Amino acid sequence: MNPERIHAEFPAPEYRGAQEQALADVRDAFQAGNDVVLVRAPTGSGKSLIARAIMGCARQVEEADPVDATGAYYTTPQVSQLDDVAEDDLLEDLKLIRGKSNYTCILPGEESTPVDRAPCSRERGYDCAVKHRCPYFSDRAIASAREHAAMTLAYFMRTAGSEVFRKRDVCVVDEAHGLAEWAEMYATIDLDDRTVPVWEDVRVPDLDGDVDATADFAEHLARVCEGAKDDLLGRDELTPEEAARRDRLQELISELQWFLEDYEDPESGTTWVVDADGNGVTIKPMDPERYLKHTVWDRANKHALLSATILNKEAFCRSVGLDPSNVALVDVEHTFPVEHRPLYDVTRGKMTYEHRETTLPKIAETVVRVMAEHPSEKGIVHAHSYDIAESLASRLEDYGVGDRVRTHDSDTRDAELERWKESGDPEVFVAVKMEEALDLAYDLGRWQVLCKAPFLNTNDSRVAARLADGQWSWYYRTALQTVIQACGRVVRAPDDRGATYVADTSILDLFERARSDMPPWFAEQVDRMTTPDLPAVDAAAALGDTTGGVEQVDTPAAAGGGAANGGTGDGGAASGGGATDSGGTSGTSGGASTTARDGDGRSEREDARRERSSPVADVWDAE
């Protein structure tokens, strides 16, 4: 690596904000001998351009001996981030490669068949006459030969050990703050009738969290999977369904073998936890250092990890298996005026599960008032979970403002987001898990409401194990990370403006508990937080003029009081105290009244949705 090239490799015609200084600091950090540089760059810093400049410092083929690693990787866990890279003309020399399922076959009659189910994957010894033109294999060949290759973190990790994507000189990981959590998710093994093709052929013992017994079961299951896979491999031709079964069996065998090798390795730093019930078994790693070493750290000589929210260098290094003494932290200055990104305290009480029935109606009322403050501007409401989203949308409908509200479920998430972004009306999008990797620049989003402190679910076995070990700083830091990410969604440039309304009292408590981990630029936002003087509840005012385009209006004027007026919550933990109303949002006038929901507020539809959600829904769909 030659860090001296970093400025010459910057792909834009001129620097913006603090980019020039950031590149100088990254150059100095690598020249000081660090193998890993953490770049803490706020939203709108142009991290992708900084990433490309770092990649350009990689050893080039003409400078290298045959055994030397050359070139660079760019990877990110966010698919949308990779899409942004693909659309950026300044990054056109980054060759993107995606997984096989993202490409379709070009053979006659197979044009709608994903490449991973094409004849080359179904028929033994199939010799494809057009493989050189296959969109997947063509992209893969180009990406492997190019100096700069870009891919999702999932694909990057899956290609560890590949002869195609070998070790390179430099690897840049964008949005790297969740690297440990993503690694844990990718290394988690879900065993049930949906994920295990031979589930009916095995007897699942009563594991009760016993990792030794789980390892014995994993060995048995791997043998059964091997037998079923060998049977399929012995056939000359497979149907698409059989090809999918074969691939899943091979994937499962690899997952189980990895778990067994790591569990039996006395030098492994990974702790494994097991959740088991009558429906299935989930094997989860905590701090999977060995997994990251194999899939990330061994893939390049030097690494740059970029994010706005790597909040604590030492804690981050511990979580991903890095030695802090070999890691440098570069802080990039935030160049967006703090008055353009105000925080407003509209807290109405705690949104923990035991208090939600009391607090949610008040938050719905507050959202109506915020809508009236921004009648001609698009806004997003971060609901945190589908339970909250559905209940909130129902109450907004009761207020008579449903015509301005758009919602989504797990199946329509991306489609509804795109429809909302493309709409010329000032719609309000009630969203779940969109606090990251969402660009709502300018009129795409002028305001947002944070409905709930995004604490991880304490019923998740990994979370429970860490808290039992006293890792409360990690717990609060993880939630703060998500809040900071969310605050960056509606302010994307120095001349952009967007207001963030904090509705859950527990977020104020989070600010207190995690204060020492706040970047200075976010601490300044928190210190300036005020309580706005919102309009009264009025459905007509909240609906505004929904027939015209979006026009910019000023954010609400501050009306006394700071964050301290809001009180504190319980930080998401199950400890006493009632909900606390705060801020200038109590009292109503006009508008419709809310309608209380029966029982615990859940419906059969909500339960069904939870069943369909991802394997980590117990964390991300947290109560």
Image (spheres, rainbow, N blue to C red):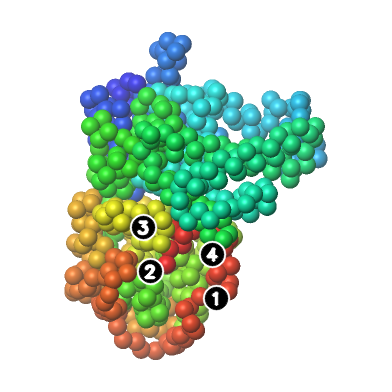
Q: Earlier in the sequence, mark 4 or mark 3?
A: 3
Q: Earlier in the sequence, mark 3 or mark 2?
A: 2
Q: Residues within 10 Å of mark 1 (few under 14, many from 20)?
A: some
Query: Disc 4 to disc 3, how far (Cα)?
Result: 21 Å
Q: Residues within 10 Å of mark 3 (few under 14, many from 20)?
A: some
- Residue 378: percent from left, percent from top: 44, 66
- Residue 453: percent from left, percent from top: 34, 64
**Relative to residue 128, is residue 588 depicted above or below?**
below
Q: Nearer the viewer, residue 544 or 299?
A: 299
Q: State the residue at coordinates (25%, 35%).
A: 324
Residue at the spot of label 1: 603
- Residue 552: percent from left, percent from top: 38, 65
Of labels 4 and 2, the one closer to you: 4
Q: Residues within 10 Å of mark 4 (few under 14, many from 20)?
A: some
Query: Disc 3 to disc 2, how far (Cα)?
Result: 24 Å
Which element carries disc 4, helix, strand or loop?
Answer: helix
Residue at the spot of label 4: 610
Which element carries disc 3, helix, strand or loop?
Answer: helix
Residue 575: which quarter of the image? bottom left
Of labels 4 and 3, the one closer to you: 3
Q: State the residue at coordinates (38%, 34%).
A: 266
**Relative to residue 446, is residue 535 depicted above or below?**
below
Labels 4 & 2 near each other (Cβ < 8 A): no
- For residue 464, the mark is 3
**Relative to residue 614, is residue 355 depicted above or below?**
below
- Residue 487: percent from left, percent from top: 34, 58
Residue at the spot of label 2: 451
Query: Disc 1 to disc 4, how far (Cα)?
Result: 11 Å
Q: Nearer the viewer, residue 349 or 43?
A: 349
Name the residue type under label 2: Cys
Q: How many marks?
A: 4
